[in-house]
Image: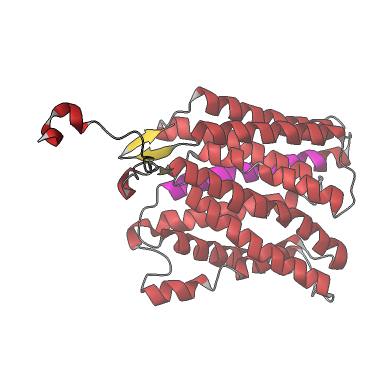
Amino acid sequence: MAGSHPYFNLPDFTQPSPPSTPPSLPSHQRCRPSDATKGLLVALLGGGLPAGFVGPFSRMAYQSSHLPSLELLLCRCLFHLPIALLLKLRGDPLLGPPDVRGRACLHALLNVLSIGCAYSAVQVVPAGNAATVRKGSSTVCSALLALCLESQGLSGYDWCGLLGSTLGLIIIVGPGLGTLQEGTTGLYTALGYVLAFLGGLALSLGLLVYRSLDFPSCLPTVAFLFGLVGLVGSVPGLFVLQTPVLPNDPLSWSCVGAVGILALVSFVCVSYAVTKAHPALVCAVLHSEVVVALMLQYYVLYETVAPSDIMGAGVVLGSIAIITAQNLSCEREGQVVE
């Protein structure tokens, strides 16, 4: 037959061809974010941004009802205690397995010391400068400790973003350090900066300790231990060193509730992020807290923001963009695609 001849089997170009559809990749071959990308995004959106509201809300609570710092820490720890119900429902021990219980308690103690140093520092130095020094020291210390203890290196782009974010913090806090007064006032101011630095060091140590913990329900366990250790330490200190104050206006109660919820969200997100990405990069991304705090300081508290603050915030945001862009990658069939 004529149809069997090879020349008669050509395609008919007079008829419109059906639209071609690209073949769909199987679910296991589709691109999905890598662990480092997930960790940095969680640290940015869930750790740094909510934490940026904590400082201004704490300042508003102090200005409204003169709420002491240890009482604010006590209220913050109370929001961590209901996590015990989750642990009980899951049948997990409240203090963690016996073999890692000491490290889990050490992690909680380091975090309480870090926040206690931060709250003490803001009483003698500006809140923005104290937060800047704390975040900068935590970034530098995390990088050095990771290199010395974990032998975990960073790429050139990561070092560029890390140094850039630290430079931005120096630009923000530099003018305040250059105007230290002599005498008792200058001594207390210098002590405040030392406390802020020690708070950052304790934070970086706490993150490294948390990375060494590996057991089921690790995250809720350390969150509950933070509330328990903070409660045990802040209650005696509040009655010995400070005077408890009962807030008597809705604004103070609203600020205290917002601080407790936002701080809990930030704590959980940072603890998750540090298990996915390098602790130094997580701390560098958390510098977004300083930028958010500066914005609230200007638009909500109506406090002056210096040109150096705006310049430093721009450098910090650029550095975070470099770190995030460098670590944005996807996984496909077990391979990482940049």
| Along the line of sight, the residue nearer the viewer: 29 or 52 | 29
Report whether 176 appears left or right of 44.
right
Above or below: residue 327 compared with residue 51: above
Image point 37% across, 70% down: which residue?
92
Quick one: quadrant of the N terminus? Answer: top left
Residue 3 x %, y %: 15, 36
Magenta stretch encompasses residue 204: yes
Image point 80% across, 69% down: which residue?
252
Magenta stretch encompasses residue 44: no
Residue 34 x %, y %: 42, 42
| Along the line of sight, the residue nearer the viewer: 307 or 120 | 307
Give, as a single range, the part of the protein colored magenta: 189-211
What secondary structure predominates along the stretch shown in magenta? helix
Image point 70% across, 65% down: which residue?
258
Quick one: quadrant of the C terminus? Answer: top left
Residue 117 x %, y %: 68, 50
Report whether 218 appears left or right of 134.
left
| Along the line of sight, the residue nearer the viewer: 276 or 192 | 276
Above or below: residue 252 compared with residue 335: below
Image point 33% across, 44% down: which residue?
25
Q: From where the camera sits, is residue 214 visible? A: yes
Above or below: residue 58 compared with residue 139: below
| Along the line of sight, the residue nearer the viewer: 9 or 132 | 9
Q: What is the residue that sits farthest to the front in this orientation?
A: 2
Scheme of colours in the image: secondary structure
Quarter assignment of residue 331: top left
Report whether 125 appears left or right of 197.
right
Residue 210 x %, y %: 46, 50
Quarter assignment of residue 260: bottom right
Q: From where the camera sits, is residue 192 visible? A: no
